[in-house]
């Protein structure tokens, strides 16, 4: 009988250790997802004012896009940098490409990065929305 109790105790102990380890892994995963969600919200918040005024449907028609985007760039860069910490390698590469399109692609090497948004405000909205796609919630079970 003492051997039987020892085996039961050992099985219970192994179950507790295994259950604790699984709980620990889920807690780490949940914490990381929450941090990514907060960083994603900060990224969306960083662009909120500019989206509101540069949006083609905005009531403000004579906005100075140059100064608006130049002044907002530091907060955009800070939010982008913070958010990128929570992306895996594949997501980080795709996000960097989307950022490159938003920030650098003007088609004219002599034009400032925001020049393309003067004539096409919808392009600004599309490129920012492309950045926002990375902030979407994903399933908890996605690996």
Image (spheres, grey):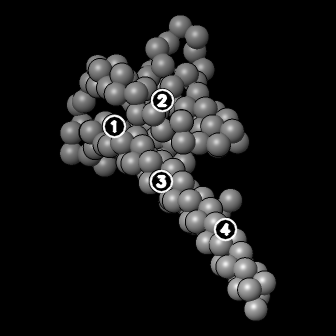
Q: What label sits on residue 81 in the rendered view?
A: 2
Estimate the spatial distance between the alpha carbons at disc 2 and disc 1, rounded to whole Å.
Answer: 12 Å
Separation of marks 2 and 3 at Cα, in angstroms: 19 Å
Q: CA distance from mark 1 to mark 4?
A: 42 Å
Quadrant of res 87: top right
Q: Which residue is mark 1?
A: 46
Choose the circle earlier in sequence order: 2 or 4: 4
Identify the residue at image location x=61%, y=32%.
96
> Circle 4 sits on which residue?
18
Mark 3, other Cα within 10 Å: few <14 / some 14–19 / many ≥20: few
**Callout in the foreground (2, 4):** 4
131 to 139, vertically: above or below? above
Number of residues whose C-alpha sits closer than 10 Å to that of mark 1, classed few (under 14), some (14–19) or many (20 or more): many
Q: Residue at x 57, y 15 (%)?
A: 108
Against 36, is 4 above or below?
below
Label 3: which residue? 31
Crowd tier of the residue under label 4, counting other residues whose Cα lies within 10 Å: few below 14, some 14–19, many 20 or above? few
Looking at marks 2 and 1 on the same chain, the residue that comes earlier in the sequence is marked by 1
Q: Earlier in the sequence, mark 1 or mark 3?
A: 3
């Amino acid at each position: 009988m003492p051997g039987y109790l020892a085996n039961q105790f050992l099985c219970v102990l192994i179950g507790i250790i295994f259950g604790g380890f699984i709980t620990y892994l889920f807690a780490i995963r949940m914490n990381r997802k929450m941090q990514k969600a907060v960083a994603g919200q900060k990224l969306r918040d960083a662009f909120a004012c500019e989206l509101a005024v540069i949006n083609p449907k905005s009531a403000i028609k004579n906005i100075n896009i140059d100064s608006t985007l130049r002044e907002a760039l530091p907060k955009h860069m800070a939010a982008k940098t913070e958010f990128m910490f929570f992306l895996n390698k594949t997501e980080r590469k795709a996000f960097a490409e989307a950022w490159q399109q938003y920030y650098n692609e003007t088609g004219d090497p002599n034009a400032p990065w925001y020049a393309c948004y003067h004539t096409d405000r919808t392009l600004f909205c599309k490129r920012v929305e492309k950045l926002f796609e990375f902030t979407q919630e994903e399933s908890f079970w996605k690996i």
